[in-house]
Amino acid sequence: MTDERAEESTQRGDGRRKHRASRKKRAFLWITLLILLVAAVIGAKPGYHWLKARRAEQFAAEGGELFKQGKWNEAAEKYRAALQLNPLGYPGLEGAARLASRADRPEAAYLWEQVFKSPQCTDADRQEYAALLLKLKRLDVAGKIIDQLLKANPDTKTLTLASRYAEQTGESGKALEFAKVAMNRAPDDDAARSRMAELLAASPDSTQQAEARRILWELVGKEGPNKRLALQVLARAPELSTDEQTRILRSLEGLASPIVEDVLLAADFRIKLQLGDADRIYDETIARFGKGDTTTLLQLARWLNAHRQSERVLTLLPIERATENNQLIMVHLDALALLQRWSDIDKLLARSDLMFDPEVLESFRARSAQGQDSATDAEFHWNRALSAAGNDPFKLRFVANFAEQTRATAVALKAYEQLARFPEHAAFAYQGIERVGGKTGASATQRAAAEKLLALTPTDPNSTAQLLYLDLLLGSDVEANLAKANDLVKRFPARLAFRITAALGYLRQHDAGSALAQFSGPSNAPPIEWSKTPPSWRAVYAAALFANEQPEKAREIIATIPEGSLNAEEKTLIAPITEAK
């Protein structure tokens, strides 16, 4: 009995131990499940975001493939889907930004700004963003990005961007230096060569122009992205021969995928070469692009205004269509101004639905007042334009440029002077002051601007030469300034601009023979095409010819100088020639 009870007691104990063990096991399982549940709740949001990010990357990758295939609309849908899932995801932002840039969409700047803020932003992204900012004239931000790129062993693309930035801020010497460095690093890089040619082509120096044309024609002979730019630069070259014009036209017509600019340039040359009735060419061009998007219409209307086809612009852009976009309404206003329809301009500017910034509106009102010979009203509106521009350098640039184009020189000078207070715009401003001062005959204003420009760019030989030229023109410290001019000629014997300055110095010393010798140049220098040189250079050459008893040749040169293109001292320089008739 005792043994049976003991066994029974043992069994009951084992049962209780098993029960307790079972309860512990169940408790452990519930605790484990609870921990997993809590973990799942905590991890659900990041996991969900991870899935969204992965899906966004897939959409962005699909968009990239469609973009490569030229299916831009489909690519845009994919990028939109990617950004909806992950608004700050790098793949979607970067792809959408590149597409927006290629499609010239206004969203491009915002998208690139977000890419730039991303930790995954690359130097290639920064280059694309800087290029867009230069295109949009947002020079302050562009300059900071380009400076950042220059500090990290810059490639040719960065150097080319730096060259374009320097050019836009008025530092032509720096622009050329960056372009030279880019070419030296990659002499076979067509983009670098194209940039160098673009700068040389804009030079008044015939030697540099000849070198530019050589490079550009080489690029035209190659298929690639730089062929179109080379054709555009060549097309802007002054006084092209008939053969050159014909060659450019054939090249434009041979482009595989011509864009609006190509077709308009080709139309220019057909008109110049008289290859058809001009009115028919205008009508055919309008029929081809007249129903295009806003960008296309803007290009077409500006082209028509440049050809003084203002009535056609007004037909193309009736007021209802023009007022849909600020740029279009500006072109419409330009057409009315060319037709001197000032009352129509005033009515249009009085509309309440115009969305112009105040400085733009007041500038147009000032031009209208000038056209109606109302000096008081014009002054009133110009003052309001300057006040509205305030301390915004880009608004001041607009007013300065608009005033210069409308020959409101006093206003232009004031706007440029205010602009010069901003360091990144100072070189551009001083060049403007110098240019406007030359048009008004204000040599002292020119010289003051040239001196300040040299202080900004002390290593630029062009700035040095310009100040020396003005000092010699004013008869200031002739011996010392002639010595500096001769030093420039020794360093750059092919530069006609520097030899002109030396020639003026010799004329001031009454050394006629040495003055005329400056126009011979080195043995390998191309012949000087005087019709393509600045009027001031022709004045110095005419004075040198006259001083060497060649009055007929001197008068032939003077006959090519446009009326009102010389300042007071330059007119005095050639006065003996005109008086000796």
Image: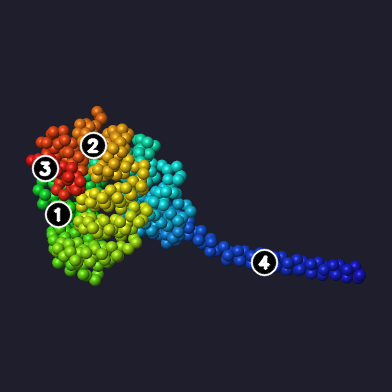
Q: Earlier in the sequence, mark 4 or mark 1?
A: 4
Give the structural element (helix, strand or loop) at label 2.
Answer: loop
Q: How is the image coloured?
A: rainbow
- Kindly report which numbered mark, 3 or 1, lies closer to the viewer in this rendering: 3
Q: Are marks 2 and 3 in contact (CB under 8 Å)?
A: no
Give the structural element (helix, strand or loop) at label 1.
Answer: loop
Question: Compared to 506, does 438 lie above or below?
Answer: below
The answer to whether residue 462 is left or right of residue 118 is left
The answer to whether residue 408 is left or right of residue 311 is right
> Disc 4 marks which residue?
31
> Disc 3 marks which residue?
578
Please give the name of the residue rendered at 14% of the width and 43% of the height, measured from the top-left corner. Answer: 575
Q: Residues within 10 Å of mark 4 (few under 14, many from 20)?
A: few
Mark pair 3, 1: CA separation: 35 Å
Q: Amino acid at mark 2?
A: Gln
> Disc 1 marks which residue?
308
Q: Earlier in the sequence, mark 1 or mark 2?
A: 1
x and y percent of residue 90 in the render? 45, 55
Q: Are marks 3 and 1 in contact (CB under 8 Å)?
A: no
The answer to whether residue 326 is left or right of residue 100 is left
Q: Residues within 10 Å of mark 2 (few under 14, many from 20)?
A: some
Q: Earlier in the sequence, mark 3 or mark 4?
A: 4
Q: Residues within 10 Å of mark 1 (few under 14, many from 20)?
A: some
x and y percent of residue 462 in the render? 30, 42
Give the structural element (helix, strand or loop) at label 4.
Answer: helix
Inspect this view and state whether residue 341 appears: yes
Quadrant for the N terminus in the image:
bottom right
